[in-house]
Amino acid sequence: MSFSTLVNDLTYRDRPTSTNTASTAHTDTRSQISRARSYASTAATSVSISGDISSQLHGGYSHPLARAWQAERQLTKSMLIYPIFVTDNPDEMEPIPSLPGQKRMGINRVVEFLRPLIQKGLRSVILFGVPLAPTAKDALGTAADDPQGPVMATLRLLRRAYPRLFLVADVCLCEYTSHGHCGILHDDGSLNNNLSVDRISDVAVAYAEAGAHCVAPSDMNDGRIRAIKLKLIEAGIAHKVVLMSYSAKFSGCLYGPFRDAAGSVPSFGDRRCYQLPPGGRGLARRAIHRDIGEGADIIMVKPATQYLDIISDAKEIGSDMPVAAYHVSGEYAMIHAAAKAGVFDLKTMAFEATEGILRAGASIVVSYFTPEFLDWLET
Ligand SMILES: [Zn+2]
């Protein structure tokens, strides 16, 4: 039915049938209803006549539950990993100014801090060590696997206190090296890949033996996934430790607040020689292929929002394995800053960003919004 025919039809149906002034209002109301009914019936007829059924999408997502069903992956509490910064100052509980709501804490505060979150359904944390003692850093990152250091001590403590909490240990040297780089250096300041891989794989095994369910090397040295897997096999624990590789970790300015939190700013140069250039999609695909071949159980992409195509690539390349995305400190801080400036609602944006990450292909999200999501997902 054409639009002009539809208009004629409505005009015909709305012609006045009474001259009685007192009944005019009543007639008008009936006329409105009649007009609406007529429009509804003719509109429906028009669809069926034209046969254009595929254009009718609204019905499929009119109900909130039906809208949720449109997502291939719906955000659940078990998808979330919460980053925790543990210092070597046992009683510390310090807010991190550039990461609103986040804290750096000592080992004596961790159990108490996590209790309410675990009661709300927290399933997993990722631990970052923050050595503050003046003597804690050296050229080899010796403190990384100090048995009394913050990460190893916290792993042992949390395994006892919360046996069902899944513990991920970030594995890197940058928090522990005097130069702040993610490995051991040559005299010219460049990364010594062989020594770095050897050292980082030792640290990974130490974390796993201390109680980490999952070790997650974030250093980006070539060949470290294979080295860690082989040493886990050698130690007889490869069958019970997940190896999550930061495969596609891009360099850029989104890590600023994290470096504040972890005290891991390089003392010279930057990490561009080992982290990926932001435009390097092909390079990221090669790194993902490589790490899967070397024995990674989970592939991670970092940062997330600016790299959704890489998450999608990771899911395509690693179609038979979980893909994780790290919604990094800069992304988190931007959402907070924009919400504070009145640009948008914090909760709505946190969901939109995270659902975008899931839509791209991730089923695990490392997120500073985890405590809020534990509340928000309850309702
Ligand atoms: Zn690092």
Image: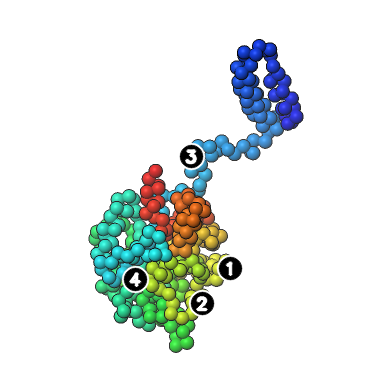
User: Which numbered mark, 4 or 3, is in the foreground of this view?
Assistant: 4
Residue located at (39% from left, 43% from top): 379
Q: Are marks 1 and 2 in contact (CB under 8 Å)?
A: no
Secondary structure, mark 2, is loop
Mark earlier in primary sequence (1, 4): 4
Q: Are marks 2 and 4 in contact (CB under 8 Å)?
A: no
Residue under label 3 = 64
Residue under label 2 = 273
Mark earlier in primary sequence (2, 4): 4
Question: In 3D space, how far apart are the residues under numbered discs 1 and 2 (Cα atoms)?
Answer: 14 Å
Residue located at (35% from left, 63% from top): 95
Question: In 3D space, how far apart are the residues under numbered discs 3 and 2 (Cα atoms)?
Answer: 47 Å
Secondary structure, mark 1, is loop
Task: Identify residue type, mark 2.
Answer: Cys
Mark earlier in primary sequence (1, 3): 3
Task: Identify residue type, mark 4.
Answer: Val
Q: Position of residue 145 (x, y in %)?
A: 31, 74
Question: In 3D space, how far apart are the residues under numbered discs 1 and 3 (Cα atoms)?
Answer: 38 Å
- Camera-side residue: 342 or 106? 342
Residue under label 1 = 279
